Image: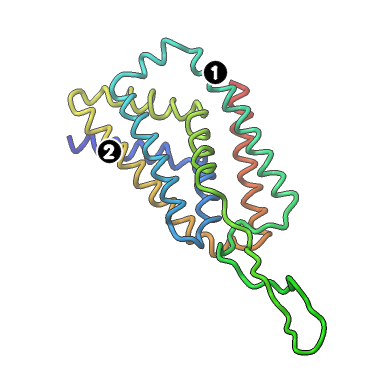
Amino acid sequence: MLTALLSGLGLCLSLIAAPGAQNVFLLRQGVRHAHAGYRHAVVLALVCLACDIVLISAGVAGFGAVVESAPWVFDAARWAGVLFLSGYGLLAAWRAVRGGDAIDVVPTEPVVSAAPAAREEGPGHTLTLTAAPRRTTTALAPAILTCLAITWLNPHTYLDTVLLLGSVSTSYGDARWFFAIGAILGSAVWFAFLTFAARYAARWLRSPRSGRILDGAIAVVMLSLAAFLAAG
């Protein structure tokens, strides 16, 4: 049982640690919202972990055999993934080319603006300043939807979790669920690491230039994955 658990842990880590759409998305979101604590990044990491739990459990339960008998599912997911990843990659490329915006972040509380709201002339009158809210961070709900799309529209997600992990688990017989637990632990360890790593990486990614570099890397990853999927 311990062997099965450790095997699932190691195999999942080796698969999930590879650069991919999900990882670069979580990294950017973690960096962007580092100022606000861990809440935003943790919620997205938990969403990814929940998806992995469902997919790994389905693969170990034998759903992989069902998916193999319906290849049209992969074709539909493949082209949906091509469109989504291409769009996301082009947006990242546009941010990288346009520049001017740092990924990190700005406090959400209002600050005092230097521009007066009303000005009255004459002695005895003072200048009135208005509070101008700074740019707020990206809402959590759209980020969750994007995260779900990146996860479920990527056929490699199914290949790695449902098919590969599911097929390997069969070699452990009755201990295959310990293999599944190990794989889920591997997923949890990786997403926890990525969440904390993004927070510390934000220290070096707070300038517009570094933001453009990261967006450029994201564009390369996303468009490369889209091209790879389109090529079949």
Based on the displayed image, in which of its 4 quarters is residue 3 positioned? top left
Decide: is 33 above or below 140.
Answer: below
Mark 2 = which residue?
182
Residue plotted at (33% across, 40% down): 10
Q: Nearer the viewer, residue 44 or 15?
A: 44
Q: Nearer the viewer, residue 215 or 112?
A: 112
Based on the displayed image, in which of its 4 quarters is residue 8 positioned? top left
Mark 1 = which residue?
76
Check disc 1 and give the amino acid type: Ala
Mark 2 lies on a secondary structure that is helix
Decide: is 107 above or below 98.
Answer: below
The way the protein has been coloured in the rendering is rainbow
CA neighbours of label 2 inside 10 A, class few (<14), some (14 to 19), many (20+):
many
CA neighbours of label 1 inside 10 A, class few (<14), some (14 to 19), many (20+):
few
In the displayed structure image, the side of residue 33 where residue 2 appears, left or right: left
Residue plotted at (48% across, 59% down): 199
Residue 51 disc label: none
Residue plotted at (37% across, 29% down): 55
